[in-house]
Image: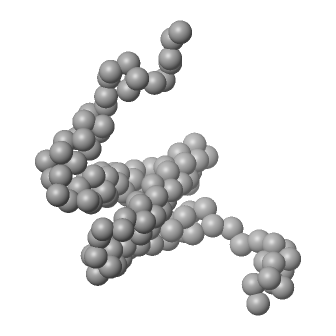
Amino acid sequence: MKLSGMSTLQGRLTSHDIRAVAARLAHPEDPLAEWHFEFGEWRKACAEFQQMERDNIVAQQKPSALALRQHRYVLFLLLTHGEELALQLMQTPVVKESEKKRLLEQTDAFLGTLTDSWHTWHGQVLPSHREALSGFLA
């Protein structure tokens, strides 16, 4: 039976996987070692996204439909991963609340920037939708 798309089951790891394991093993006393690694990788991805946004969206007179769709796709991926990091942090019981708060504030700052980008380039106001929900939101 051939398992396609399951490279880790075949003994092959990506560089990302290896770096995550190394981070965890290098700091076995730190319950957030792997989280810090993932957070750093996410921040790098956010910076790359911002450069892509400047080049393909902001600098263009009229961004193409493809550029906007790619932008939206990567933006959703980054927002999703950032929220996942926040949830992992919140559910880690051995970390002091003050440290969780500090790291959540950093995570939320990046999420806020990504959310601003969503509203700037993709946000749409749907008055009829808001009216339908007004009874529940009051």
Give coordinates of residue 46: x percent, y percent: 36, 57
Q: Examine the rendered structure and indicate whether residue 115 appears above or below residue 37.
A: below
In the picture, measured across the screen, residue 90 lies left or right of residue 16, that is right
Give coordinates of residue 1: x percent, y percent: 53, 9
In the picture, measured across the screen, residue 128 lies left or right of residue 26, that is right
Q: Examine the rendered structure and indicate whether residue 15 appears above or below residue 94.
A: above
Residue shown at 20% from the left, 59% from the top = 30
In the picture, measured across the screen, residue 53 lies left or right of residue 19, that is right
Check the image and name the residue furthest to the left.
26
Residue shown at 77% from the left, 71% from the top = 126
Q: Nearer the viewer, residue 84 or 42?
A: 84
Res 106 quadrant in image = bottom left
Res 16 quadrant in image = top left
Residue shown at 31% from the left, 52% from the top = 38
Quadrant location of the C terminus? bottom right
In the picture, measured across the screen, residue 63 lies left or right of residue 110, that is right
Q: Nearer the viewer, residue 54 or 47?
A: 47
Q: Examine the rendered structure and indicate whether residue 19 appears above or below residue 39.
A: above
Give coordinates of residue 15: x percent, y percent: 26, 34
Q: Nearer the viewer, residue 126 or 65?
A: 126
Would you say residue 30 is visible in this rendering?
yes
Would you say residue 110 is visible in this rendering?
no
Residue shown at 51% from the left, 11% from the top = 2
Q: Which of 95 and 133 is in front in this view?
A: 95
Q: Examine the rendered structure and indicate whether residue 15 appears above or below residue 82.
A: above
